[in-house]
Amino acid sequence: MALYIPESRRRRRLIVVAAIAVVVGLAVGVLIGRATVPTVSDRIATVRTEARDISGGLRVLVLHIQAHTANDTAGEAKTVVAKVRSQLLAEFDKAPWLGDAQKRALLTELASLTDRTDPTSAAFGSAAESLARHIDVTFGA
């Protein structure tokens, strides 16, 4: 014996099942989305790690200057300082907690390092080390 189910009841069941599927899908999507978004502390930690990498590059340059191991320390210094500038500008965009005064102070110190004419001297190394410390302090690295 076949049971007759009216068309309206089949349509209603289909609509209810579709609505439940949409709600469940949205809930799962929201949960997955929230679980994969980096937290504020994760983003801060990332910026601090990248700032530590920037200051580390300056410190490697200082070590090369002190040990006189670089074939072309003057060229290396210009390359490193240019790279530090571009990296710092990128980090400023990622670190909204830094004020304009802090950014200006770092860029001023970097500009004075760039303007030095003695990239193989101990004084240049000292200035680069000072900038590296300033970057660490500013970013809280």
Image (cartoon, rainbow, N blue to C red):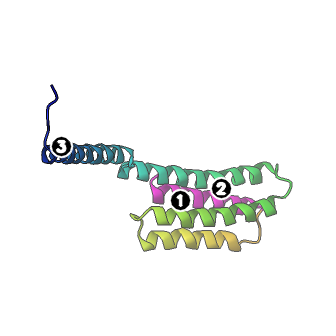
Q: Which mark is residue 19?
A: none
Per the image, label 1 sits on a secondary structure element best described as: helix
Q: Does the residue at mark 3 contact the one at mark 2 (Cβ under 8 Å)?
A: no
Q: Which residue is mark 3?
A: 10
Asked if residue 124 is among those painted magenta in the image, a careful observer would answer: yes
Residue shown at 44% from the left, 62% from the top: 95
Quadrant where the N terminus is found in the figure: top left
Residue in front for this viewpoint, 124 or 2: 2
Closer to the N terminus: mark 1 or mark 2? Answer: 2
Question: Is label 2 in a helix, a strand or a loop?
Answer: helix
Disc 1: which residue: 135
Q: Residue 35's quadrant in the figure?
A: top left
The answer to the question of whether label 1 and label 3 lie on touching residues, with beta carbons closer than 8 A, is no
From the viewer's perspective, is the residue at label 3 or at label 2 nearer? 3
Residue 108 in the magenta stretch? The answer is no
Q: Work out how far the residue at label 3 is from the one at label 2, CA to CA, in angstroms.
A: 72 Å
**Residue extent of the magenta highlight:** 120-141
Report helix, strand or loop for mark 3: helix
Please state which of residues 37 and 18 is positioned toward the viewer in this rendering: 18
Q: Is there a contact, CB below 8 Å, between mark 1 and mark 2?
A: yes
Identify the amino acid type marked 2. Leu
User: In 3D space, how far apart are the residues under numbered discs 1 and 3 (Cα atoms)?
Assistant: 68 Å
Q: Earlier in the sequence, mark 1 or mark 3?
A: 3
Q: CA distance from mark 1 to mark 2?
A: 10 Å
By secondary structure, the bulk of the magenta-drawn segment is best described as helix
The disc at residue 58 is 2
Tag 3: amino acid: Arg
Snapshot quadrant of residue 54: bottom right
Q: Residue furthest front?
A: 1
